[in-house]
Image (spheres, helix red, strand yellow):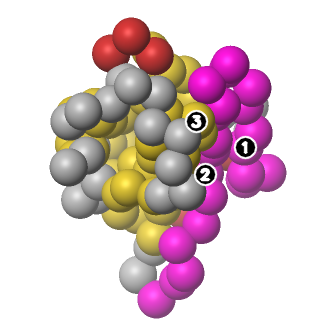
Amino acid sequence: QVQLVESGGGLVQAGGSLRLSCAASGIILSINDMGWYRQAPGKQRELVAGITRRGSTNYADSVKGRFTISRDNAKNTVYLQMNSLKPEDTAVYYCNAHGVNWGANDYWGQGTQVTVSS
């Protein structure tokens, strides 16, 4: 069984920074894509940033230039560095792993709360 555990959320003032981490555990030989999603109250879950195993990245327009996604394949860990945070970034952030061990699968973390005060 694959598990994803996120850490690093919290409360920060507008303009501040946070770094989220997500570690995947279990019998893992390979993870294709990893990413971060977020869901604000009353809104649908949306993709924030994604990264392939080879390091190609993509970002939501709303976070381009402020957020950076990275991963450590040896540690099965993905990171999200969030700078210049805005109140509209407030949400529960979820980690996702897609294509674990070459399967057509998706695994999700339990979510971590990020709150940005104005």
Give the foreground label among 2 and 3. 3
The quadrant of the picture occupied by the C terminus is: bottom left
* Amino acid type, callout 3: Asn
Left or right of 20, for residue 30: right
Q: What residue type is labelled 2?
A: Val
Q: How crowded is mark 1: few (under 14 residues within 10 Å), some or many (20 or more)?
A: some
Q: State which quadrant residue 94 falls in.
A: bottom left
Q: Is mark 3 on a helix, strand or loop?
A: strand
Nearer-the-camera pick, 94 or 34 = 34
Q: Is residue 29 visible?
A: yes
Residue at 37% in and 43% down? 13
The residue that label 3 is drawn on is: 32
Residue drawn at point x = 54 percent, y = 22 percent: 70
Identify residue type, mark 1.
Tyr
Whether tag 2 and tag 1 are in contact, CB under 8 A, the answer is yes
Q: Distance between the residues labelled 2 and 1?
A: 6 Å
Q: Left or right: 40 with respect to 47?
A: left
Residue neighbourhood size for the residue with mark 3, other residues' Cα within 10 Å, grouped as few (<14), some (14–19), many (≥20): some
Residue named by callout 1: 59
